[in-house]
Image: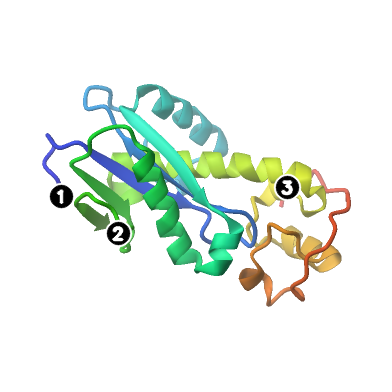
Amino acid sequence: MFDKKNLFAGVDEAGRGPLAGPVYAAAVVLHPEKPIAGLKDSKKLSANTRDQLFDIICRDALAWSCAFATVDEIEQHNILQASLLAMQRAVMKLEVALDGVLVDGNQAPNLPFPVETIIRGDALIPAISAASIVAKVLRDREMCVLDKQFPQYCFAKHKGYGTALHIAMLRQFGPSAVHRKGFIRNFVTPQVVIPSRAFCDEGSI
């Protein structure tokens, strides 16, 4: 791992598994004199806690950025390559001179910096934890935007993941333009439909 005196970015993605929507990635450079308490894998945090930490990260981090790969790019390449593309874009948007990059998992994007992959890095490395939170929060917000464009799928409730509600809506309405056709083939016949408005149960999934 890099020396503590080095300036490095933590990198993670959000949204590899959903049936719909883009995959996001974030890169965060934590300020050495402004440690942030409570950082951990975003999946282990409540939505409210993620939002609170997101605001702190944006305020106190030395630098942060976020990027995404589109549904078309996921279809054109595959989810792994699209995730790596989003990571690459996020890192290259940072406006600081990096000594290296720490990436969650065992696959790294192509970057002009030394890169180290770390299994479970989102639980072990604060900068990667911060990146996982930023990516998750911003992707969830994007899915809420898509919910307004395609209200019949209730994206705001499940964020594109394959819940029972989402699959039921897929079978009722068919896929939208933001569904990942390669991910939904076991549930519906792939075809883009004109969105129509439907009621989403306000109860929890």
- Local packing at callout 3 (Cα closer than 10 Å; few below 14, some 14-19, many 20+) is few
- Local packing at callout 1 (Cα closer than 10 Å; few below 14, some 14-19, many 20+) is few
Question: What is the spatial separation of the Cα atoms under label 1 and label 2, in whole angstroms?
Answer: 13 Å
Residue that label 1 marks: 1
* Residue occupying the point 73% across, 47% down: 204
- Would you place residue 30 above or below residue 80 in this image? above
- Would you place residue 187 above or below residue 197 in this image? below
Tell me where residue 26 appears, x and y as whole percent.
Answer: 42, 43
- Local packing at callout 2 (Cα closer than 10 Å; few below 14, some 14-19, many 20+) is few
- Would you place residue 149 above or below residue 188 in this image? above
- Would you place residue 180 above or below residue 112 in this image? below
* First reached walking from the N terminus: tag 1 or tag 2: 1
- Return the mark for residue 204: 3
Residue type at numbered disc 2 = Ile
- Return the mark for residue 119: 2
* First reached walking from the N terminus: tag 2 or tag 3: 2
Query: Which label lies toward us, 2 or 3?
Result: 2
- Location of residue 141 (image quadrant): top right
Tell me where residue 64 appears, x and y as whole percent.
Answer: 38, 34
Tell me where residue 117 appears, x and y as whole percent.
Answer: 26, 57
- Location of residue 145 (image quadrant): top right
Residue type at numbered disc 3 = Ser
